[in-house]
Image (cartoon, rainbow, N blue to C red):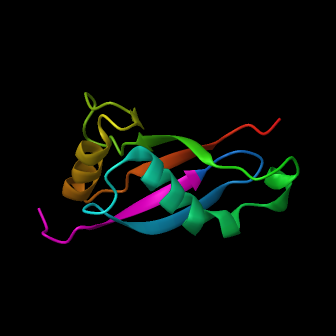
Amino acid sequence: MSTDPLIPLMINLDGQSRINQVVLVDEEVTTDFEALCTLLYEQFQPKIPEFYFESGERSITKLYVDWCTEGNPGYPRSTQIDDTNLRAVLRLIAARKGVDVVRVWLNEVE
């Protein structure tokens, strides 16, 4: 495994419009779920279409990693990321050096 603490993440927002963004996450700095959500949102927000904000500002409330399972039929297809597994998931993404995708879930604004 590389000693570089920067981990590239392919971020995906699916919905009425599909948006993909690649961001670098510092494993040493991003130690809690809320901080990761804030970091991703700051980098991702300019690409989100305006209609997502008609009811107000949004935020990321859930993260999932969709694992590239090609050649690994027993591997899980998706894992929800939270405070209990954040560092482990980031390390696994870095070690796999594959094309795993992190899906973001925006909060509902009422």
Q: Is residue 92 magenta?
A: no
Q: How many marks?
A: 0
In percent of the image, x 13 and y 67: which residue is there? 2
Residue 42 spot, x, y in % from top left: 58, 65
Left or right placement of residue 78 versus residue 5 in this view: right
56 displayed left or right of 81: right
How far across and how far down the image is residue 63, in percent? 49, 42
Residue 79 vs residue 35, the one in the foreground: 35
The correct choice, above or below, for 85 with respect to 37 in the image is above
Which residue is located at x 23 percent, y 48 percent?
92
Q: Is residue 9 magenta?
A: yes
Q: Is residue 42 above or below residue 32?
A: below
- On screen, residue 102 above or below 29: above
Q: Quadrant of residue 105?
A: top right
Quadrant occupied by the C terminus: top right
The image quadrant where one finds the N terminus is bottom left
Image spot of residue 45 (x, y percent) = 66, 63
Looking at the image, residue 82 lies above or below residue 46: above
Horizontal side of 102 relative to 13 (left or right) equals: left
Q: Quadrant of residue 107?
A: top right
Residue drawn at the location 19% of the way across and 55% of the way down: 95
Q: Residue 54, position in %: x, y?
A: 88, 51
Per the rendered image, the range of residues in magenta is 1-12
Residue lying furthest top:
74
